[in-house]
């Protein structure tokens, strides 16, 4: 296949009566396109539970096989995570490469990582994912019976060798990331000593965080209308004229529904910027019909990384993508955020902006200045109390 020809993929989604089921498979299609594939067909079905062997059952698998032959598909992509045995069985049944949402995200991260830290994080996540699928790679080396009922053979030895090699590589990656985390903690302590106020941009992928980041600090961070355009954390100084104060502003990796836990763990050092921030700018795509679910997904990840208690401002971006008739009556108000993990509700300040056109960006700056002044006072007081306690 020529390098210029994109692999043709069939997208498959299974509804297990989940509230988050994407019946249009729109996000999976965007992920596939971002990874360099061309979706050609979509297949959805309902099941009470996954089929142990083929995830979708033999009947639906036969249907997908016939469809793949008709449209010339070269790969099958599942919206849900597959077990190693399900993935192996599906490939044998369909006679095509089969991959899931997790591997797709890993592929994109691998393509986009630029910094040494980002590459280390992707490598660790890839190794952890691959370690559970070694049997799939070496299925051509079947374990054979070798005399007097003793089972063995080259396949078993090769699998054990690969397990050991991957285990050692995982250990090395973790050790390197520990050093990176220590460096970040040192930088954080330096900012604390300087009483530097830190703000982190968080939000669902493709909500416009990097565009807003550029609008606020006049930077030239890479921006694209695609998922995971930014992987590596970028930090710049932001001058808030109303308070004559310099604060640090960080643009972090975007979140996504069902973000693989391996990636959450692997990117802990990067996401620590959000957990250590004094204020979070939670950027939301105001034009997305799924914005409520996206807010909930981001809140879940913030909980996982220990950032759920950090003060937030909801920034509803892409105001320019809304028709004037859909604009809210008030461009700044209070918004109730549902916390599924605590069954609680909190009221968070919200502002509508367009990072693309600059609409409401000056108002956002003033809002940031007000919060920085209020929270910095509390931060300085806490620091003073710590010093007093240590002295006593």
Image (cartoon, rainbow, N blue to C red):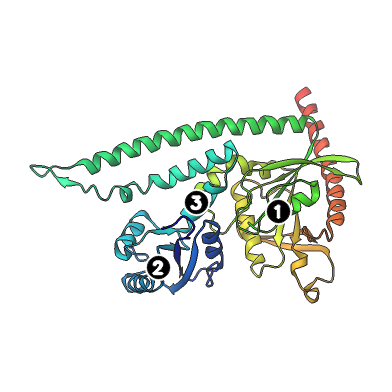
What is the secondary structure assignment of the residue under circle 2? loop
From the image, tell me which residue sits under label 3: 107
For label 3, the SS is helix
Q: Earlier in the sequence, mark 2 or mark 1?
A: 2
Foreground mark, 3 or 1?
A: 3
Residue 373 pos. (x, y %):
86, 44
Q: Nearer the viewer, residue 225 or 308?
A: 225
Which class describes the residues within 10 Å of circle 2: few (<14), some (14-19), or many (20+)?
Answer: few
The residue that label 2 is drawn on is 49
| Label 1 crowd (10 A; few <14 / some 14-19 / many >=20) | many
Left or right placement of residue 68 versus residue 18 in this view:
left
The residue wearing badge 1 is 209
Q: Earlier in the sequence, mark 3 or mark 2?
A: 2
Q: Is any atom of residue 272 visible in this view?
A: yes
Q: SS class of the residue under badge 1?
A: helix
Q: Quadrant of residue 355?
A: bottom right
Q: Residue furthest bottom?
A: 325
Judge by depth and name the residue closer to the eye, 370 or 89.
89
Q: Nearer the viewer, residue 257 or 28?
A: 28
Q: Is residue 203 left or right of residue 356?
A: left
Determine the CA span between mark 3 and mark 1.
22 Å
Query: Where does the image place residue 210, in percent across and percent down from the top left?
Result: 71, 51
Which is in the foreground here, disc 3 or disc 2? 3
Q: Earlier in the sequence, mark 3 or mark 1?
A: 3
Find the residue positioned furthest to the top. Answer: 391
Residue 279 x %, y %: 75, 47
Q: CA distance from mark 2 to mark 1?
A: 37 Å
Quadrant in which the N terminus appears = bottom left
Disc 3/disc 2 C-alpha distance (Å): 28 Å
């Amino acid at each position: 296949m020529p390098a210029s020809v994109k692999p043709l993929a069939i997208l498959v989604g299974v509804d297990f009566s989940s509230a988050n089921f994407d019946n249009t498979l729109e996000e999976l299609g965007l992920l596939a396109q971002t990874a360099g594939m061309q979706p050609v067909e979509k297949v959805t079905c309902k099941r009470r539970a996954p089929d142990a062997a083929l995830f979708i059952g033999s009947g639906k698998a036969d249907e997908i096989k016939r469809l793949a032959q008709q449209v010339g598909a070269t790969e099958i992509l599942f919206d849900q995570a597959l077990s190693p045995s399900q993935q192996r069985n599906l490939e044998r049944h369909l006679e095509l490469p089969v991959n899931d949402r997790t591997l797709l995200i890993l592929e994109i991260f691998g393509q986009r990582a630029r910094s040494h830290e980002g590459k280390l994080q992707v490598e660790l996540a890839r190794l952890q994912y691959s370690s559970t699928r070694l049997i799939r790679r070496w299925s051509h080396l079947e374990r054979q019976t070798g005399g007097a009922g003793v089972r063995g053979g080259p396949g078993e030895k090769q699998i054990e060798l690969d397990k050991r090699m991957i285990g050692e590589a995982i250990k090395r990656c973790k050790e390197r990331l520990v050093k990176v985390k220590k460096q970040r903690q040192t930088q954080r302590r330096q900012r604390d000593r300087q009483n530097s106020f830190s703000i982190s941009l968080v939000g669902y992928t493709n909500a416009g965080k990097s565009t807003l980041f550029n609008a606020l600090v006049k930077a030239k961070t890479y921006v694209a209308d695609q998922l995971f355009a930014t992987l590596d954390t970028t930090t710049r100084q932001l001058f808030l004229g109303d308070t004559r104060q310099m604060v640090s502003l960080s643009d972090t990796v975007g979140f996504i529904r069902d973000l693989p836990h391996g990636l959450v763990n692997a990117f802990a050092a990067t996401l620590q910027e959000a957990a250590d921030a004094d204020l979070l700018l939670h950027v939301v795509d105001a034009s997305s019909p799924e914005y409520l679910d996206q807010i909930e997904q981001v809140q879940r990840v913030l909980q996982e990384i220990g950032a759920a208690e950090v003060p937030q401002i909801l920034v509803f971006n892409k105001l320019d993508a809304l028709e004037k008739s859909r604009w809210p009556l008030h461009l700044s108000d209070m918004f109730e955020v549902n916390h599924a993990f605590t069954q609680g509700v909190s009221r968070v300040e919200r502002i509508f902006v367009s990072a693309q056109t600059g609409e409401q960006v000056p108002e956002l700056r003033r809002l940031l200045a007000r919060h920085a002044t209020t929270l910095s006072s509390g931060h300085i007081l806490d620091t003073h109390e710590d010093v007093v306690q240590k002295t006593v």
